[in-house]
Image: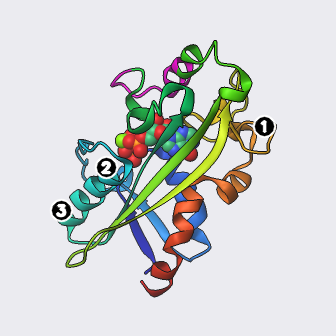
Amino acid sequence: MNELVIATKNEGKVREFREMFSKYGIEVKSLLEFDEPIEDIEETGTTFTENATIKAEAISKQYNIPVLADDSGLEVDALEGAPGVYSARYAGLEKNDQKNLDKVLENMKDVPTDQRTARFVCAVAVARPDHDTFVKIGTCEGHIAEEPQGEHGFGYDPVFIPQGSQRTLAEYTSEEKNAISHRHNAIIQLEEWLKNA
Ligand SMILES: O=P(O)(O)OP(=O)(O)OP(=O)(O)OC[C@H]1O[C@@H](n2cnc3c(O)ncnc32)[C@H](O)[C@@H]1O
Ligand SMILES: [Mg+2]
């Protein structure tokens, strides 16, 4: 396999997948690079696994090709797992990263440091014509910062400090993030499939 379609319109994800798959010699094509516009796929599931499956199968069926999809988000313990599967829409349907992370910080303003634990979760689904879809899940444990720091990455990275670190993920280089991220931890479980695909 030298090219893999990823059913996402998130440029941050695309960048990370491109970097992580380059070492397998696989080029990544996202929904942003199709000749025709691709309609948004409604994420009607209640779990990361369901939503990743919905996205991968929708595009795989439409084009009759193998497709990978990623559904991910931030689970904050003090917010009972929110924003969770609603991470992209936490502050409204327009999907604004800044508003989303501001809302997390606002809802966490009275939560002391030792109770700010959280994790990123990433479900990657692989859907192929005439095969059962499979899903792998990766996580990255950490805690929520008091204020945003850093310019790298995307989404909630400026407020997420990985376990054992003093820096937010937005202060990590992309190489550093891609070595420990939830997305990395999901992808490494695909290695067998990638080698044989
Ligand atoms: O559905 P697609 O098109 O893939 O793009 P999306 O941005 O809508 O992606 P999701 O539905 O999976 O929602 C993921 C949310 O979690 C956030 N997120 C996921 N991975 C992240 C990461 O590595 N760092 C920071 N935030 C992340 C992201 O910003 C979104 O708000
Ligand atoms: Mg989405």
In terms of sequence position, does the residue under pointer 3 or pointer 1 come before the other?
A: 3
Residue 8 in view (yes/no):
no
Residue 162 in view (yes/no):
yes
Q: Mark 3 near ligand 1 (CB under 8 Å)?
A: no
**Membership of 98 in magenta stretch:** yes
Query: Residue at 29% of width from left, 53% of height from top?
Result: 55
Q: Which mark is residue 62?
A: 3
Q: Locate the N terminus by quadrant.
A: bottom left
**Hey, what amino acid is under mark 2?**
Asn
Crowding near the residue tagged with mark 1, few <14, some 14–19, many ≥20 C-alpha atoms within 10 Å: some
Mark 1 highlights which residue?
A: 167
x%, y% of residue 162? 70, 43
State the scheme by which the image is colored.
Answer: rainbow
Disc 1 element: loop
Q: Mark 1 and 2 residues: CB-CB less than 8 Å, in contact?
A: no
Q: Mark 1 near ligand 1 (CB under 8 Å)?
A: no
Which of pointers 2 and 3 indicates the residue nearer the eye? 2
In terms of sequence position, does the residue under pointer 1 or pointer 2 come before the other?
A: 2
69 in relation to 39, above or below: below
Q: Residue furthest right?
A: 166
Q: Which mark is residue 51?
A: 2
Disc 3 element: helix
Crowding near the residue tagged with mark 3, few <14, some 14–19, many ≥20 C-alpha atoms within 10 Å: few
Part of the protein shown in magenta: 92-103
